[in-house]
Image (tube, helix red, strand yellow):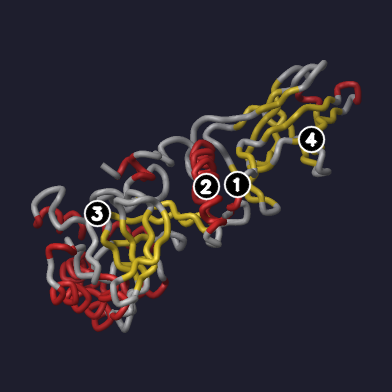
């Protein structure tokens, strides 16, 4: 989980949060630097803050109930300290050069460590772009936008950011791009093999109930098979049919017999399913509920990182019993996608999701 939390916090944020209380004595407040500043120390994120209040410049250490001691540094007339972002509330003693000024208070981190079933879990932030052939404009305009304003910028980001991943939903988009930019084909193959730029296994995203069996099979010939033959033997194992409201009984059989193990859908209750055809073949199917909810409805990343963590924490608590009941590993998907949404780093992705 820590790796993915860091995707939030090493960006620009606004706002702060703290709780420091004491009974029967004065309270020394803590003010976090805005936008938040972070470092990774001893497997915990530490946020920069300073002490405020009477005699604050006299303090030298903060001793936690757990035994951890943090040094207070004095610079530019302020008493600076790096405090843990995530943890449980605990008593602290703020020590001063004059022992009479020592005081005990309750410290509550910006984010509590109450993650339920996901306490040792991982958040998978999945950046993608939902692509109809021509929903946002004409087919020609949408193709131009995909090639030049979504796919190419995503590849450019990957050159400088080795932790950046992006996904497109259908092989048609890949075909459009390499036809427009054949000089970048090897670059696409390299990113593909790194697992950082992936593409759906079908040619497009068909309205399954409107196509006959042979047409659905051709989705795999012009999708998965075309990718394998043209991109150095790459095997695409996941199909996307994100915004189609209906499913066809035979499609899981076609996917399974084509070597596609996974299906990503939408427009149904969030969760994992074994999607069966009448012959007994199936594919593992996942839906986030609606592909755009994280950005449009939950608005996970529209504010600062602390608020994002609070919202995500509430969501995973809701799903803890479901994951536990079905013996699922504590891996939680956060799908960042919307209609023709562009490539961007985590913040502020919502601005590019019109």
Q: Earlier in the sequence, mark 1 or mark 4?
A: 4
Residue in view at x 80 percent, y 28 percent: 59
Classify residue 173 by image quadrant. bottom left
Q: Quick one: SS at disc 1? A: loop
* Residue that carries the numbered disc 2 in the rendered image: 316
Foreground label between 1 and 4? 1
Q: Earlier in the sequence, mark 1 or mark 3?
A: 1
Q: Earlier in the sequence, mark 2 or mark 1?
A: 1
Residue in view at x 73 percent, y 23 percent: 21
Q: Is residue 164 above or below residue 79?
A: below
Q: Earlier in the sequence, mark 4 or mark 3?
A: 4
* Residue that carries the numbered disc 4 in the rendered image: 62
Quick check: marks 1 and 3 in contact, CB under 8 Å?
Answer: no
* Residue that carries the numbered disc 3 in the rendered image: 243
Quadrant placement of the C terminus: top left
Quick check: marks 2 and 3 in contact, CB under 8 Å?
Answer: no
In this image, 206 relative to 56: left or right? left
Nearer-the-camera pick, 218 or 84: 218
Quick check: marks 2 and 1 in contact, CB under 8 Å?
Answer: yes
Quick check: marks 2 and 4 in contact, CB under 8 Å?
Answer: no
- Disc sitting over residue 197 in the figure: none
Foreground label between 2 and 4? 2
Residue in view at x 81 percent, y 30 percent: 94
Percent position of residue 90, x then y: 76, 36
């Amino acid at each position: 989980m820590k790796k993915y939390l860091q995707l939030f916090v090493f960006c620009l944020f606004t706002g702060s949060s703290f709780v420091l209380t004491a009974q029967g004595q004065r309270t020394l407040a803590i003010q976090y630097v805005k936008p938040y500043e972070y470092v990774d120390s001893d497997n915990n994120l530490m946020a920069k803050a300073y002490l405020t209040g009477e005699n604050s410049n006299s303090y030298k250490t903060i001793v936690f109930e757990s035994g951890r001691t943090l040094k207070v540094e004095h610079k530019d007339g302020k008493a600076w300290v790096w405090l843990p972002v995530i943890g449980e509330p605990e008593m602290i003693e703020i020590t001063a050069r004059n022992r009479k000024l020592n005081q005990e208070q309750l410290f509550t981190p910006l984010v509590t460590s109450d993650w339920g079933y996901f306490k040792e879990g991982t958040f998978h932030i999945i950046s993608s772009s939902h692509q109809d052939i021509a929903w946002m404009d004409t087919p020609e305009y949408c193709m131009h936008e995909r090639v030049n304003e979504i796919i190419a910028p995503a590849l450019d980001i990957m050159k400088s950011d080795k932790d950046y991943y992006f996904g497109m939903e259908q092989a048609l988009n890949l075909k459009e791009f390499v036809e427009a930019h054949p000089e970048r084909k090897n670059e696409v193959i390299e990113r593909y093999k790194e697992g950082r730029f992936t593409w759906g296994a079908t040619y497009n995203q068909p309205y399954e109930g409107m196509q006959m069996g042979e047409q659905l099979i051709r989705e795999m010939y012009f999708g998965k098979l075309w990718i394998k033959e043209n991109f150095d033997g790459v095997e695409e194992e996941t199909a996307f049919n994100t915004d189609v409201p209906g499913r066809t009984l035979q499609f899981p059989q076609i996917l399974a017999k084509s070597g596609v193990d996974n299906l990503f859908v939408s427009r149904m209750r969030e969760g994992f399913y074994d999607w069966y055809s009448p012959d007994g073949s199936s594919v593992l199917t996942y839906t986030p509920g609606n592909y755009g909810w994280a950005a449009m409805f939950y608005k996970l990343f529209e504010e600062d990182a602390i608020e994002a963590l609070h919202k995500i924490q509430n969501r995973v608590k809701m799903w803890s019993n479901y994951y536990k009941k079905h013996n699922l590993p504590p891996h939680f998907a956060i799908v960042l996608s919307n209609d023709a949404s562009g490539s961007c780093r985590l913040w502020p992705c919502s601005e590019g999701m019109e």
